[in-house]
Amino acid sequence: MKFTKLFLLASSLLLLTSCDYKELSYDNTQSASVHVRFDWQKAPDMDAKGMTVLFYDTQKAGDPERYDFVGREGGTARLVTGSYRAVAYNYDTETILYRGMENSSTLEAYTRRSSIEEGTQMAAISRGYTMPRAAGTEDEPVILEPDPLCGAQSDAFLLDANVAGDVTITPHMRTQEVVITINHVPNLQYTSQIGGALTGLAPSVNMTTGELGEGTATQAFTASAIGDSTIVMTFRIFGHCPYATGTQHNAHQLTVYAVLADGSKWYYTQDVGNQMHAPSQGGGGGGSGEDVEIDIVVDELPIPKPIVNGSGFQPTIDGWQGIEIPVDM
C-alpha cells in the first residue's frame, strides 16, 4: 500500500515537471472616448429624431463601429485607439435602405422597387392592370419615395488613449422636396382620385459625397385638391441629372392620373424638363447641397366633365384615356 502511494506521488511530480510552461498573455488593446457634435448650418430645418454614426478604421478594412445618438446634438462613443473617419445620417426613416456599408466611400442610400399603382395609391382602381406610363419611359424602374434624409462624412481623426477625441460632422440634405402645382383645372369637383408620376430621377445617393447613383428612375405620388381648381403634389427625390453638362439633361415627363366620378380614367403627360433644369431649382439636381425646393407649375389640365344624364364628354370606360399636354400650356 505504501509503495502504491509513493508510486502515484512520483508519477504526479513527473507529469508536473514535464508540462510546458507558457507565459500569461494580456490584451494590450486600448480604447478611448470620442465626442461627436453636429453642425446643422447646411440643413437647419432637418428635424432629425436621431443620428447614426459609423466609425470606419482608416488603417484596415472591416465593418464599421455603429453608434446611434438620440436627437440632433450628438454624444460620446468609445472606440479602440486608432485612425477613423465618421459617416453620419438620420435613422428616423422607414423607406431608406443602405448598401456598400463596408467602406465609407461606397455607402449608398436607396429605396426599394415600387409601382405606379402603389405610389398613386390606385391599386384598387387599376384592378390588377398596369397603369399607363409616359411614352418612352415604360422600362424605367419605379422606386419608392425616399424619406427626408441627411448625411455627411467627417475628416479623418486620430484617437489616442491619453486624449479625449472630438469630431464635428456637418450634415447636408441627401433628398430634395418637389412641389408640383397645377392651376386652372376644370371639373376638379368631379374627380374621385388623383395621382402623378415623374420620370428621369436619381435612383440613389452616395451618403458621403452626395453623388447621385447612375441611371434613372420614376417616382409616383398622390395629389391633393386645393379649392375648386388647383392640384398640389408634394414628394421627395434623391435628385436628378447628376451628370448634366451644358444642355445635356435627363428627360422629365410628368404624368397625372385622374379618376372621375363616373368611373372613367384619364392620364395626362407633359414634359417639365425646362422647369426641372431652371437655375432657380438648384442646377443639376440634389444630393450634395442644401434643401432646395423644386417648384413645377402646370396650367389648364383638361379634365372633362363626366357623364351626367347622358350629357357631357363621352369617355371610354374600359381603360385609361391619354392626352399629351403641349409644353407651352
Image: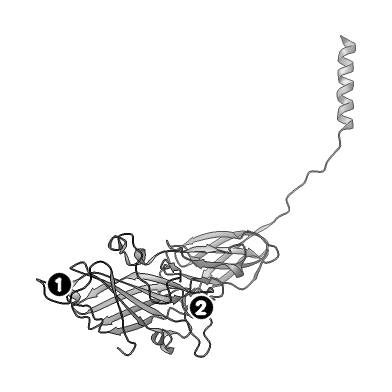
Q: CA distance from mark 2 to mark 1?
A: 49 Å
Q: Which residue is mark 1?
A: 307
Nearer to us in this view, 73 or 292 = 292
* Upstream in sequence: badge 2 or badge 1: 2
Amino acid type of the residue that numbered disc 1 sits on in the rendered structure: Ile
Picture quarter with the N terminus: top right
Q: Does residue 248 sit above or below 36 in this rendering?
A: below
Residue 288 placement, left or right of 33: left
Label 2 sits on residue? 288
Relative to the observer, which residue lies in front, 118 or 76?
Answer: 118
Q: Nearer the viewer, mark 2 or mark 1?
A: 1
Taking the spot 20% from the left edge, 77% from the top edge, the residue there is: 304
Task: Answer whether labels 2 and 1 touch (C-beta < 8 Å).
Answer: no
Left or right: residue 295 compared with residue 285: left
Question: At which x and y percent is residue 51?
Answer: 48, 64
Q: Give the residue type at disc 2.
A: Ser
| Corner quadrant of residue 303 | bottom left
Assess disc 2: are there few (<14), some (14-19) or many (≥20) residues with their C-alpha within 10 Å of its C-alpha: many
Residue at horizontal 15%, vertical 72%? 307
- Residue 327 falls in image quadrant: bottom left
| Percent coordinates x, y for residue 7 in the rendering | 89, 17
Q: Residue at x 28, y 63 (%)?
A: 125
Q: Give the residue at the far top of this rendering.
A: 1
Locate the C terminus and report the quarter of the image it occupies: bottom left
Which x, y percent locates residue 312?
A: 14, 77
Dividing the picture into quadrants, the one containing residue 85 is bottom right
Q: Position of residue 22 (x, y in %)?
A: 83, 41
Residue density around tag 1, few if under 14, some if 14–19, many if 20 or more, within 10 Å: some
